[in-house]
Image: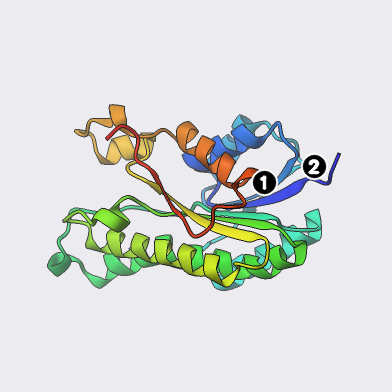
Amino acid sequence: MSDPRVIVLTGGTGGLGTAVVKRLAGQNYRFAVTYLVPEEARLFEKEVGVGEDRLMLSRVDATNTSEVNAFMQQVAQRFGAIHIVCSLVGGWAGGRDAEETDDVRFDRMIDVNLRSAFATVRAAIPHLKKAGWGRILLIGSRAAVEAPAGQAAFNAAKAGVAALGMTVAQELDDTGITANVIMPSVIDTPATRKALPFADYIDWPTPDEIAAVIEFALSDASAVITGALIPVYGRT
């Protein structure tokens, strides 16, 4: 058997990260996962059922460059390499037109969505280059390309994530490392249902459905796909 591939998932203890790890748990991977809420990390560890020899859980603020850099070094030291990076940290805040969006809300959307992705990618690239093969996966949003009214800060932040993925793909074009952006509509999670109680969630893509797309994007079979904005809109 070949050596396991090492996957870093920042913000990986949420619904999507849990689905990804559960989907890949039976394959030849090791997982390094960040979290902020200890209770969420405990639930994640229990649900995914991956042994301590294959799982590294670390409390990391993905918007903090120093913490992200240190985490990447710790992963490389423990597992010997980093092959795959999935930036899953994100958040939504809507209900404000651009003229009503204050700096606090705007900065929060930029930090949690774009700054976290940028810090993660920048810290990971040297390790991926050293491994000689790699996959970078970012989570954008349908809102980045359709830009619905009433959520200007979120739209702008996710558009930045999309641009980051496409840029990095070009910069790494001859390295064996691909970079792609998954573009969900609204992910069907308990938190999203709570935030949008009157929405018709029956057509939203589930974390498991998105995880299936991510599984392919991280595989050897996806080598010809890079710089793509991959729509995962569900049935809407």
Residue density around tag 1, few if under 14, some if 14–19, many if 20 or more, within 10 Å: few
Q: Nearer the viewer, residue 83 or 230?
A: 230
At 24% from the left edge and 39% from the top edge, which residue is drawn?
Answer: 196
Q: Which residue occupies the extreme top position in the image?
A: 202
Q: Position of residue 163 (x, y in %)?
A: 41, 66
Question: Label 2's element?
Answer: loop
- Image: 4 above or below 159: above
- Occupied quadrant, residue 84: bottom right
Cα distance in 3D space between marks 1 and 2: 24 Å
Q: Position of residue 116 (x, y in %)?
A: 48, 64
Residue density around tag 2, few if under 14, some if 14–19, many if 20 or more, within 10 Å: few
The answer to whether one can see residue 116 in this image is: no
At 29% from the left edge and 53% from the top edge, which residue is drawn?
Answer: 143
Q: Position of residue 207 (x, y in %)?
A: 46, 35
Q: Which residue occupies the extreme front position in the image?
A: 224
The answer to whether one can see residue 29 in this image is: yes
- Mark 1 in CB contact with mark 2 (< 8 angstroms): no
At 29% from the left edge and 56% from the top edge, which residue is drawn?
Answer: 145
- Image: 186 above or below 173: above
Question: Label 1's element?
Answer: helix
Look at label 2 and name its amino acid.
Asp
Residue at the spot of label 1: 220
Q: Nearer the viewer, residue 34 or 180?
A: 180
**N-terminal-most mark, 1 or 2:** 2
Q: Position of residue 184 (x, y in %)?
A: 38, 45
Residue at the spot of label 2: 53
Look at label 1 and name its amino acid.
Asp
